Image (cartoon, rainbow, N blue to C red):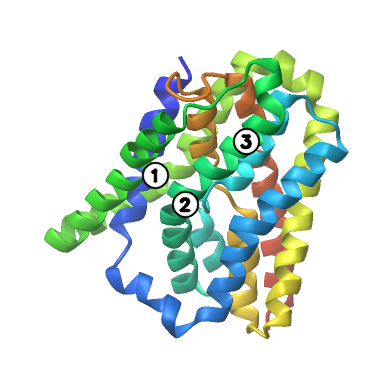
């Protein structure tokens, strides 16, 4: 049941992302390479490595081990632009980073997840059909983004109106998704909430701390640093849930539980972060 809710939600979120993109958003990588490089390094390399280390340290069972690495491999969440705006960050940079990570992870997710599955999953019967994962990502991720971009350039007025509607629906749709999964798997979630919840929270906090440190090392300004922190910490949980529960890929809804917990905790942690930085602003 849940998979037929998550797939349309993911498609709508990616279509909405495309509606707000312009080709010049991708060109910012040449104008501001350092903050973009730091954010992508943190999100695409550092976050999966931290997840891998924490999964070993907390001795997570294989299904949660793979699920934790999966959410760490996903691109930035569609709400990161809103959080960057609330934090007084660089919204244009946020849009660029979300777009770039959404495209790059089409290629990095199959590689990392294939390795993680071989590492801990095959011994307990968890396998990854890489071809199906690539096809699903192309259909549910890339195609909706391209359609959104096409609508943006063909009918900009209609694209703007549609973006406003879908933008308001994004967070409520994610809440519906999380609620459905909680109802279906509440016993498993509650049984593992202590260890897995702590592991997920530590992952978010360490990722935020490391991304902030990296930003300071390359001397990005405060607005860019806030955006990098938010982009690294905020992941596309809908995509992780779709990959975990899809009958074409893992077909394992329990594997989606780390993504569900991450979705809840990232909003809590980042809302606190936004509140702190807003108080510091003059």
Residue sitting at x 50%, y 60%: 82
Image coordinates of residue 278 in percent, x first then y, are: 67, 71
Q: Which quadrant would residue 8 be assigned to in this image?
A: top left
Q: Quadrant of the C terminus?
A: bottom right
At 68% from the left edge and 37% from the top edge, which residue is drawn? 68
Which quarter of the figure has residue 24?
A: bottom left
- Identify residue for label 3: 259
Circle 3: is it few (<14), some (14-19), or many (20+) Cα within 10 Å? many
Q: Is residue 24 above or below residue 254?
A: below
Q: Secondary structure under badge 2? A: loop
Front residue of this view, candidates 268 and 257: 257
For the residues labelled 2 and 3, say whether their Cβ atoms are less than 8 Å apart.
no
Mark 3, secondary structure of its residue: helix
As measured in the structure, the alpha-carbon distance from the residue carrying label 1 to the one carrying label 3 is 16 Å
Q: Nearer the viewer, residue 52 or 90?
A: 52
The 10 Å Cα crowd at callout 2, few under 14, some 14 to 19, many 20 or more, is many
Instruction: Give the left or right position of residue 64, taking residue 85 as reference.
Output: right
Q: Is residue 100 above or below residue 236?
A: below
Going from the N terminus, do you reach mark 2 or mark 1 first? 1
Closer to the camera: disc 1 or disc 3? 3
The circle on residue 78 is 2
x and y percentages locating residue 230 in the rendered image: 62, 61
Residue at mark 1 = 13
**13 relative position to 198: left or right:** left
- Any part of residue 88 in sight: no
SS assignment at label 1? helix
Mark 1, Cα crowd under 10 Å, few <14 / some 14-19 / many 20+, is many
């Amino acid at each position: 049941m849940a998979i037929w809710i998550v797939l349309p939600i993911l498609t709508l979120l990616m279509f909405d992302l495309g509606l707000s993109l312009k080709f010049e958003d991708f060109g910012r990588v040449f104008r501001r390479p350092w903050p973009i490089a730091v954010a992508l390094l943190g999100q695409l390399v550092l976050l999966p490595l931290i997840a891998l280390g924490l999964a070993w340290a907390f001795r997570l069972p294989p299904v949660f081990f793979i699920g934790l690495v999966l959410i760490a491999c996903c691109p930035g969440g569609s709400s990161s632009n809103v959080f960057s705006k609330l934090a007084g960050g660089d919204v244009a940079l946020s849009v660029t980073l979300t777009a770039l990570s959404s495209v790059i992870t089409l290629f990095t997710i199959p590689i990392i997840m294939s390795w993680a599955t071989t590492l801990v999953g095959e011994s307990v019967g968890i396998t990854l059909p890489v071809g199906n994962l690539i096809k699903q990502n192309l259909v549910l991720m890339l195609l909706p983004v391209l359609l959104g971009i096409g609508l943006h350039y063909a009918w900009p007025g209609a694209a703007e109106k549609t973006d406003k509607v879908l933008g308001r629906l994004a967070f409520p749709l994610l809440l519906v998704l999380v609620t459905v999964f909680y109802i279906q798997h509440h016993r498993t979630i509650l049984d593992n909430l202590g260890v897995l919840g702590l592991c997920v929270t530590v992952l978010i906090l360490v990722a935020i701390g490391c991304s902030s440190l990296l930003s300071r090392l390359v001397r990005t300004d405060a607005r860019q640093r806030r955006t990098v922190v938010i982009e690294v910490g905020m992941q596309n949980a809908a995509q992780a849930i779709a990959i975990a529960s899809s009958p074409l890929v893992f077909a394992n809804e329990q594997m989606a539980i780390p993504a569900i917990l991450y979705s809840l905790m990232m909003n809590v942690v980042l809302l606190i972060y936004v509140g702190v930085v807003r108080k510091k602003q003059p």
